[in-house]
Image (cartoon, rainbow, N blue to C red):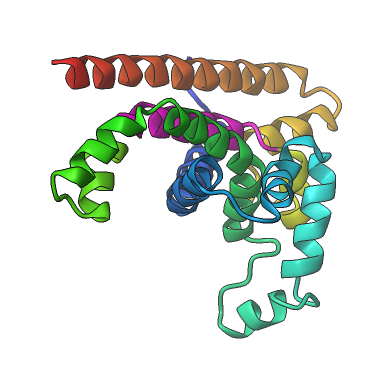
Amino acid sequence: MSLTPIELEALALSVRVAGLSVVVSLPAGIVVAWVLARMEFRGKSLVDGLVHLPLVLPPVVVGYLLLRAFGRAGPLGGLLDALGMPLAFSWRGAVVAAAVVAFPLMVRAIRLSIEAIDTGLEQAAATLGASPWRVFTSITLPLMAPGVLAGAMLAFARALSEFGATITFVASIPGETRTLPLALYALTQVPGQEAAAARLCLLSVVVAFVTLLASEWLARRLRAKMGA
């Protein structure tokens, strides 16, 4: 199936937005997951709830909150606009919206992998004189790598399908913020575009399926490499 210029544009923008959303949120996701898995402190349940809140909130609510905070009239949006980095109604805002919505899935997958690590291995390394940073980089991080990969791929897949927060925060601007879900929605609003909408729907299914297959393949390769 050859893609039309509009379909290629929407696909390329979707992949770029989803990829960047994972890149910018992954370091924070690892830190937050480690804190929730290994540390005990007052207010931990509150932090845990806030991290997972985008998972249960309607995406439109998430988009509205982002618009209030990062819109040009918002407390942070005006500053970013003055710096020449506006988020509202730009592809940068689409990246932020996708990252916020997908962040809980990423943290959850990484946290589960950290909790499954045998802490005795870390304690043994520390007993032998390894510094906390060396323990983390040589033992903890490799053991949690499958969870990090799973979290990143889940976040990427969720970001690819993001609609509500994106359209609320950055609207649907062709070539700027109109990702695959937004392009599909736009076609459903135009009479006589059923065939084009069906093509975008099929394309979205194929991209999501390929992402899941790639995630499983990479996870198997990583497990095999660690077991070798």
Is 104 or 33 nearer to us in this picture?
Answer: 33
Task: Tell me which residue sits at (67%, 37%) in the image.
Answer: 162
- The answer to which quarter of the image holds residue 184 is top right
x and y percentages locating residue 43 in the rendered image:
71, 55
- The answer to which quarter of the image holds residue 142 is top left
Q: Is residue 81 above or below residue 106?
A: below
x and y percentages locating residue 105 in the rendered image:
59, 34
Q: Is residue 90 above or below residue 17?
A: below
- Is residue 218 on the magenta stretch? no
Q: Which residue occupies the extreme front position in the image? A: 127
Q: Is residue 216 above or below residue 29?
A: above
How many labels sit on residues? 0
Is 48 or 11 nearer to us in this picture?
Answer: 48
Task: Tell me which residue sits at (82%, 40%) in the image.
Answer: 57
Query: For the C terminus, which image quadrant?
Result: top left
- In this rendering, would 187 be left or right of 31? right
Q: Which residue occupies the extreme bottom position in the image? A: 82
- The answer to which quarter of the image holds residue 68 is bottom right
x and y percentages locating residue 29 in the rendered image:
50, 47
Is 172 or 66 nearer to us in this picture?
Answer: 66
Is 212 or 147 nearer to us in this picture?
Answer: 147
- In this rendering, would 21 be left or right of 169? left
Task: Tell me which residue sits at (57%, 49%) in the image.
Answer: 40
Residue 48 in view (yes/no): yes
Q: Main secondary structure of the magenta part?
A: helix
Task: Tell me which residue sits at (51%, 43%) in the image.
Answer: 33
x and y percentages locating residue 111 in the rendered image:
51, 35
Residue 156 in view (yes/no): no
Tell me the magenta residue range: 143-162
